[in-house]
Amino acid sequence: MTGHPRAVDVLVIGGGQAGLAAGYYLRRAKADFVILDAQERPGGAWRHAWPSLRLFSPAQYSSLPGRMMPAPPGGGYPSAEDTVAYLTDYEQRYDLPVIRPVTVRAVRRGGDRLLVDTGAGTWRARVVISATGTWWRPYVPYYPGIRGFRGEQLHTVDYRGPEPFRGRRVVIVGGANSGAQILAEVSTVADTTWVTQRPPRLLPDELDGRALFALATRRAEGGAGIGDLGDIVVVPPVREARDRGVLKAEPMFSRITAEGVAWPDGTSLACDAIIWCTGFRPALGHLAPLRLRGPDGRIPVEGTRAIGEPRLHLLGYGDWTGPASATLIGAGRTARETVAEIMRSGPA
């Protein structure tokens, strides 16, 4: 695409679960829209997750609007592969106008429109929905000595399975779901040590993503949240690891040595690898020209609409952009409300 910018009423950046949910409602509203996705194939971040990753809910509670996710063969919770297949089918079923691979470099103001600069030219849009998620900005906290460690360091995004760690000494950092799931399987082949900022708390066995969504909604409405019950969903591999007695966490170390990690009391532990399951930050670099970020790195929003730029909506980045909006089921509800607001303002 060269020459003059191409015009569209609504432009969605990101073709993962949040972008597809927005596309579903934009299609229903007969909007003039396009979805730009940097990936070469459908599936969003799920295409890059480790193979054994499992959702926290049965398929019927892990679905986007309009199309139920099929139950995986043999039952149980869907895998990352199942989710990729579902998102691929979803995109095709609703004939969503996804253009890929297109990398969005910047969103900037251009008079009465927002200009979206990409590797394939510029678009003009009345409204932009940013749905780029967080997977592309893994977060690793700084600790003294981190650059001098002689072993291997990797983040959740780099993890592909336990086999490379067979027979090794591995420290796994992070007390949320990814840390617990990765610990569960690495501990079957390696000598593992789990390190967390605070003692990890497992949810009651009967609670899964269905309850998490309800709790996230209650928290957004000023009620109790998921933190009141626990942090980790006891999916089957985590339950098995608990039964083996490996879900025992050490307090957070204070520094990293060439050979391992060390605590304030002088205790140290030698290890061959550190796996950082320490979360992500919103992938918002393309919005930098708009100068909207607050001191906490987030863009202040009212609902999903950026307060400093009402032509911009942020979808699917976490509870700050809608209750449970970073989940499959939560993305749908937030997308519905966002598209309804956009269509009420009407194409100019």
Image (cartoon, helix red, strand yellow):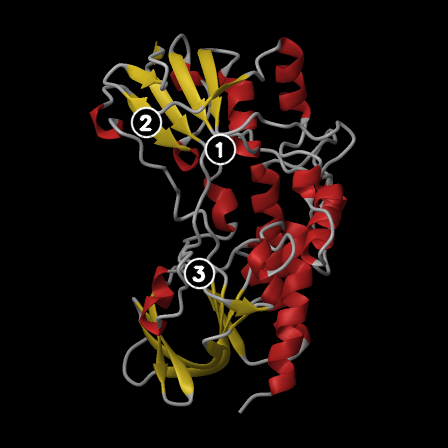
Q: Earlier in the sequence, mark 3 or mark 1?
A: 3
26 displayed left or right of 159: right
The amino acid type of the residue labelled 1 equals Trp
Query: Which residue appears at 45% of the width and 32% of the height?
Result: 277
Residue 252 seen anywhere in this rendered image of the structure: yes
User: Can you give x and y, in whole percent of width and height, for residue 302 in the image?
Assistant: 57, 70
Query: Which residue appears at 67% of the width and 76% of the height?
Result: 340
User: Can you give x and y, in whole percent of width and height, for residue 316 in the image?
Assistant: 56, 57
Crowding around mark 1 (Cα neighbors within 10 Å: few <14, some 14 to 19, many 20+) is: some
Disc 3 to disc 1, C-alpha distance: 21 Å
The amino acid type of the residue labelled 3 equals Asp
Q: Earlier in the sequence, mark 3 or mark 2?
A: 3
Disc 1 to disc 2, C-alpha distance: 16 Å
Secondary structure category for the residue under label 1: loop
User: Can you give x and y, in whole percent of width and height, for residue 181 in the image?
Assistant: 56, 27
Q: Which residue is mark 1?
A: 50
Query: Which residue appears at 66% of the width and 32% of the height?
Result: 233
Q: Which residue is mark 2?
A: 153
The part of the image, by quadrant, that contains residue 152 is top left
Q: Which residue is mark 3?
A: 37
Q: Earlier in the sequence, mark 1 or mark 2?
A: 1
310 displayed left or right of 2: right
